[in-house]
Image: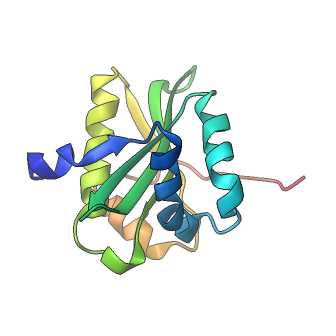
């Protein structure tokens, strides 16, 4: 991966930066509305959530939401909650750049593991993750209350 490409990835910290990530994030998280996005992200940031983004010609091309945490089972880890590239620029290496940046961030922060969940219907995403040398290590179960 080109180091210049990785240097294009930034952490969104300001309201304006978070706001500009919404159109891409909305392609993955269709339930969140534009008028709720910034406050939701800022609320999650108080609990350790980070939002990274990569731009193409001053327009957000990809977004990754993640947090660092520690657990008895995994030790210190980076968990990717959201990873999406704008459908208009997919297959142009923005996903790979974000993924590589996330792995480097995890290593810089002394994480022992890197995790994410992906919906069972997201076959293209699964192919991407397997190509990144990830493996399927568990089943995630959920219950809507």
Residue 100 rendering spot, x and y as whole percentages:
25, 47
* Res. 81 visible in picture: no
- Residue shown at the point (61%, 63%) measured from the top left: 29
Quarter location, residue 93: bottom left
Nearer-the-camera pick, 1 or 88: 88
Residue 128 rendering spot, x and y as whole percentages:
34, 65
Along the horizontal axis of the image, is 141 left or right of 128?
right
- Residue shown at the point (54%, 71%) measured from the top left: 27
Along the horizontal axis of the image, is 138 left or right of 84?
right
Along the horizontal axis of the image, is 50 left or right of 35?
left
Nearer-the-camera pick, 39 or 137: 39
Location of residue 26 with respect to 77 vertically, above or below = below
Residue 122 rendering spot, x and y as whole percentages:
51, 72
Outermost residue toward the bottom in this view: 88
- Residue shown at the point (40%, 32%) measured from the top left: 113
* Res. 140 visible in picture: yes
Nearer-the-camera pick, 120 or 9: 9
């Amino acid at each position: 991966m080109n180091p210049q490409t990785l240097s294009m990835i930034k952490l969104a910290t300001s309201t304006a930066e978070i706001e500009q990530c919404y159109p891409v994030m909305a392609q993955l998280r269709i339930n969140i509305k534009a008028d709720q996005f910034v406050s939701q992200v800022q609320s999650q940031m108080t609990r350790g959530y980070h939002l990274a983004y990569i731009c193409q010609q001053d327009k957000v091309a990809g977004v990754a939401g993640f947090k660092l945490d520690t657990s008895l089972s995994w030790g210190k880890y980076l968990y990717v909650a959201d990873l999406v590239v704008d459908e208009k620029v997919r297959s142009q290496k923005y996903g790979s750049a974000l993924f590589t940046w996330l792995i480097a961030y995890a290593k810089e922060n002394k994480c022992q593991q890197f995790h994410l969940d992906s919906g069972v219907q997201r076959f293209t995403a699964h192919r991407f993750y397997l190509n990144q040398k990830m493996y399927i290590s568990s089943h995630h179960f959920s219950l809507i209350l």
